[in-house]
Amino acid sequence: DIQGFIFDLDGVITDTARLHTKAWRQVADQVGTPWSQRLQDSLKGISRMESLELILRAGGLAHTYSDEQKEKLATAKNTEYLRLVATLTPADILPGVQSLLDDLDAHGYKMAIASASSNAPIVLHHLGLTHYFPEVVDPRTLHHGKPDPEIFLRAAELIKVAPAHCVGVEDAAAGVAGIVAAGETAIGIGDATVLRAADINFADTSQMTLVNIRAAMRTPSV
Ligand code: G6P
Ligand code: MG
């Protein structure tokens, strides 16, 4: 029986990918890396410093910047990202998510956030969702990023629910892989081919209702 729900943030609760993109584009323009859809997609779910490395590499600049200069670029990106995040409101919560959280809360499920973003608490604040998530994993305390299961195991620990009794919700393949490796039940939001490792797939968040989740748990996809 399921007792806990662990949510990724970006692409599951809200679409902050467009804000990360805007902020990284400024850095790319500054250093002279041409932007592409492929580069943009590759940044999904990737940590801040890894994202910067990908942007520098895409511009043939992998060895041009010192660690100190890289820190400055990453900080500039984050400053711009935070400026954009401040414009978020509850209207930016993805369809169906608020009512799912209300349902889960009403049924006494424990809830946590497992996001690679160290800005997750401030994003939740602007969305007005802080009170649903007493537990937010601090990614700076982790040794490995997704697809490693560490973040999902830590989230289960924080809500004091055994992984086997947890559901994890993700929109990225690396995230789904992490949930599965943690021994939790994986819900994939988005392309079911990309997220075929998930136990349950929904095309978008509007289909992710408690009724649909319970029905899918009784008839797991093969
Ligand atoms: C999430 C996003 C990534 C972002 C990462 C770190 O995984 O999908 O695009 O780079 O978090 O976010 P942060 O806010 O800590 O820079
Ligand atoms: Mg995500």
Image (cartoon, rainbow, N blue to C red):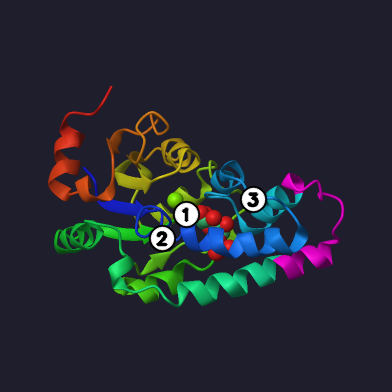
Of labels 1 and 3, the one closer to you: 3
Residue located 76% across and 48% down the image? 59
Q: Is residue 199 visible?
A: yes
Name which quarter of the figure residue 135 lies in.
Answer: bottom left
Of labels 2 and 3, the one closer to you: 3
Does dot 2 land on a helix, a strand or a loop? Answer: helix
Near mark 1 (Cα within 10 A), the count class, few <14, some 14-19 or many ≥20, is many
Residue 174 left/right relative to 169: right
Asked whether the beta carbons under mark 1 and mark 2 sit within 8 Å of each other, the answer is yes
What kind of residue is marked 3?
A: Trp
Residue 96 spot, x, y in % from top left: 21, 56
Q: Is residue 132 visible?
A: no
Which contiguous range is marked in magenta? 57-73
Residue located 69% across and 48% down the image? 54
Residue 209 left/right relative to 31: left
**In the drawing, what numbered circle is on residue 35?**
3
- For the residues marked 2 and 3, what is the alpha-carbon distance in whole angstroms? 39 Å
Q: Which residue is mark 1?
A: 154
